[in-house]
Image: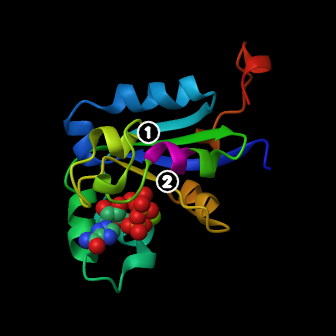
Amino acid sequence: MSEHERTFVMVKPDGVQRGLVGDIVARFEERGLKLVGGKFMRIDRDLAEEHYGEHEDKPFFDDLVSFITSGPVFAMVWEGQDAVAQVRTMMGETDPAESAPGTIRGDFGLDLGRNVIHGSDTEEGSAEREIDLFFAADELLDYERVDETWLY
Ligand code: RTP
Ligand code: MG
């Protein structure tokens, strides 16, 4: 169990276009995770190719890069106990059709491409790599929430 683990999360262009940023932020806040960084931004091709580098040999890579660069995204870093796995559980499966209702993709996702949200996977080092890719150290804030006793 990792107490103050950080994970990288991003509302994808479809989520931004559909006005889901507020709902998604609220879900993580209500779950007891702490927001330590957030940035509304547009991803350029180089950043997209680096972020999704693990998929560069896959047939869907070009479509994935085109999609993620097609409009603004809301990039975030969330912190809490087992944050990486918790966020993945709250996201649902990669394919919205296989995602349970109550999960973000199960509630909002349309298809494999338009699945609303990205979260770091549980592979060792993934979250740190993605956080470093999107955020400078001084963009991540150390602070205590007033109700920390009741949070992770
Ligand atoms: P993400 O990285 O975006 O959080 O999604 P994930 O971990 O659940 O899934 P991953 O395997 O990392 O795939 C990255 C994104 O590529 C698209 N995809 N398309 N056509 C296909 O077979 C296919 N497989 C994956 C999805 O948009 C997925 O989120
Ligand atoms: Mg992934």
Q: Dot 2: within a 10 Å radius of its alpha carbon, few (fewer than 14), some, or many (20 or more) residues?
A: some
Asked if residue 97 lies left or right of residue 22, the reply is left
Which residue in the protein does label 1 denote?
Answer: 39
Q: Residue at x 78, y 49 (%)?
A: 2
Q: Where residue 46 sits: x, y (%)?
A: 35, 69
Magenta part of the chain:
87-91
Extreme-bottom residue of the structure:
57
- Quadrant holding ligand 1? bottom left
Q: Is residue 145 above or below residue 41?
A: above
Q: Where residue 28 sits: x, y (%)?
A: 53, 32
Cα distance, mark 2 to mark 1?
Answer: 9 Å
Can you tell me whether the CB of the residue at mark 1 lies under 8 Å from the nearest atom of ligand 1?
no
Q: Is residue 84 above or below residue 3?
A: below
Image quadrant where one finds the C terminus: top right
In terms of secondary structure, what is the magenta stretch mainly?
helix
Please name the amino acid that badge 1 sits on: Lys
Which residue in the protein does label 2 denote?
Answer: 134
Asked if residue 49 lies left or right of residue 30, the reply is left
Q: Residue at x 22, y 56 (%)?
A: 111
Q: Residue at x 49, y 36 (%)?
A: 38
Q: Dot 1: within a 10 Å radius of its alpha carbon, few (fewer than 14), some, or many (20 or more) residues?
A: some
Asked if residue 136 lies left or right of residue 60, the reply is right
**Mark 2 vs 1, N-terminal side:** 1
Where, by quadrant of the figure, is residue 20 drawn?
Answer: top left
Secondary structure at badge 2 equals helix
